[in-house]
Structures are given as structure tokens and as C-alpha cells.
Image: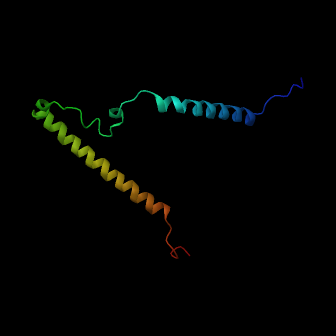
Amino acid sequence: MSGQTHSPAEWAQMVSLAVALYAAASVPFFLLVDASRADFHPHALALLPLPDRFFATPVGCRVLAVWAGVRRAVVEAGRDVAALAVLLTTSPKGALR
């Protein structure tokens, strides 16, 4: 025995190799596992039946109105973030001499 210990880089390589081998070995399992096509439906939440009686009440109408306002605010915030990202990541040509 020479008494040499492994460096942190060697430990990281071993852990990375172990994770990669585990992932590669689990691919056939996840490909062959029993799954239904309905499990992967992109609009599964939208297809859930909603209680129509709730949305016919005044409270349900308020919930729908608040939901519409929240959705509009999220869309506008997303647009603002995208515009700010474009402004901050581009540089004007010739203006900053």
C-alpha cells in the first residue's frame, strides 16, 4: 500500500461515472415500463370536469375575474421581462464611442 488518497477531482469523476452508468442502465426500464398514452396527454388538466354550479355563483364569477386579471398580469410581466432582456443584452452600434 502506498497510502495515496484520491483527489477531489478523482472522486468527482467516480461519482459522475456512477451516475452516468445508472442513468444508462435505467433507460430500458423507463422505455419498457407499462404506461398509457393518456398519461402523456398535454392538456390533461384542462380536460378535468369543472363544477359548473360553483362558477354560476357570485363567488365563482369573482374567482374567474381574479384568474383573468392574474393571467393578464403574468403575460404582461413576461413581455416586460423579455423586452428588458433584449435591451440589456444588445449593444447599440456606434453610439458609445
Q: What count of labels does the image hold?
A: 0
Which quadrant is home to the N terminus?
A: top right
The quadrant holding residue 57 is top left
Q: Position of residue 36 (x, y in %)?
A: 36, 30
Which quadrant is home to the C terminus?
A: bottom right
The quadrant holding residue 67 is top left
Furthest toward the right, the residue is: 2
Residue located at (16% from left, 30% from top) = 51
Residue 27 left/right relative to 12: left
Q: Position of residue 76 (x, y in %)?
A: 31, 53
In the image, residue 86 above or below residue 35: below
Residue 1 left/right relative to 41: right
Residue 10 left/right relative to 77: right
In the image, residue 17 above or below residue 81: above
The quadrant holding residue 68 is top left
Residue located at (35% from left, 55% from top) = 79
Residue located at (31% from left, 50% from top) = 75
Q: Position of residue 85 (x, y in %)?
A: 44, 57
